[in-house]
Amino acid sequence: MALRPIITLGDPRLRLPGRPVVKFDRELGELIDDMIETMDAAPGVGLAAQQIGLDLQLCVIRVDDELYEVANPEILHLSGEEGAWEGCLSVPGYRAWRWRAEHAVMTGQDRHGRRVNVSGHGYLARAIQHEFDHLHGELYLDALPEDAEILTEEELDERLEAEREDAAAPD
Ligand code: NI
């Protein structure tokens, strides 16, 4: 296993739509292991092949200690709506308020080519949508409305801290 360098905004490889994974061999398994190691070391909740410079339909997601590896994913269902501060390992240091479906169901294949389904609410639903977008060369910043707020992580920390103090202050 090996850590792979994560490429960042401005690198054109992030914009490559993924080719389907067709060979479910040992090489694919090793690539997936590298992606898991790279995601966990970052640390992050998801990593798409584009983020290590590969134009493949392949991503890994880890939310609530559940690990998912998905090749050739399709989104089967999206419903509800939820806003949250979203970030990306390929856009280090920033967060933007992004609306996403609150529930998402993804289907795809694991390293052996077996069918896998990933279904989740909230944070997992967000990760499913975020990684799926990466596989089509899209970043979470692309679909923000014009008036969306993009903050540095420091600015966001300060804001959340101020909100906590407001909430704690007696009337
Ligand atoms: Ni990302």
Image: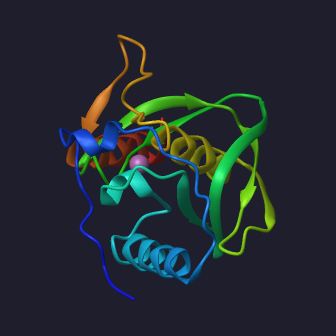
Residue sitting at the far top: 146
Residue 79 position (above or below residue 144): below
Residue at position x 38%, y 70% in the image: 43
Q: Quadrant of residue 102?
A: top right
Q: Is residue 136 left or right of residue 12?
A: right
Residue at position x 49%, y 36% in the image: 136
Q: Quadrant of residue 138?
A: top left
**Horizontal and vertical percent position of residue 145:** 42, 14
Residue 64 appears in the figure: no
Residue 138 appears in the figure: yes
Q: Quadrant of residue 29?
A: bottom right
Residue at position x 63%, y 76% in the image: 65
What count of labels does the image hold?
A: 0
Residue sitting at the far left: 10
**Horizontal and vertical percent position of residue 40:** 43, 76
Residue sitting at the far front: 23
Residue at position x 48%, y 30% in the image: 98
Q: Is residue 23 left or right of residue 107?
A: left
User: In the rendered view of the protein, which quadrant contains the N terminus?
Assistant: bottom left
Residue 18 position (above or below residue 99): below
**Horizontal and vertical percent position of residue 24:** 63, 71
**Display colour scheme:** rainbow
Query: Of 69 and 122, which appears nearest the observer?
Result: 69
Query: Of 136 and 104, which appears nearest the observer?
Result: 136
Q: Is residue 35 left or right of residue 121?
A: left
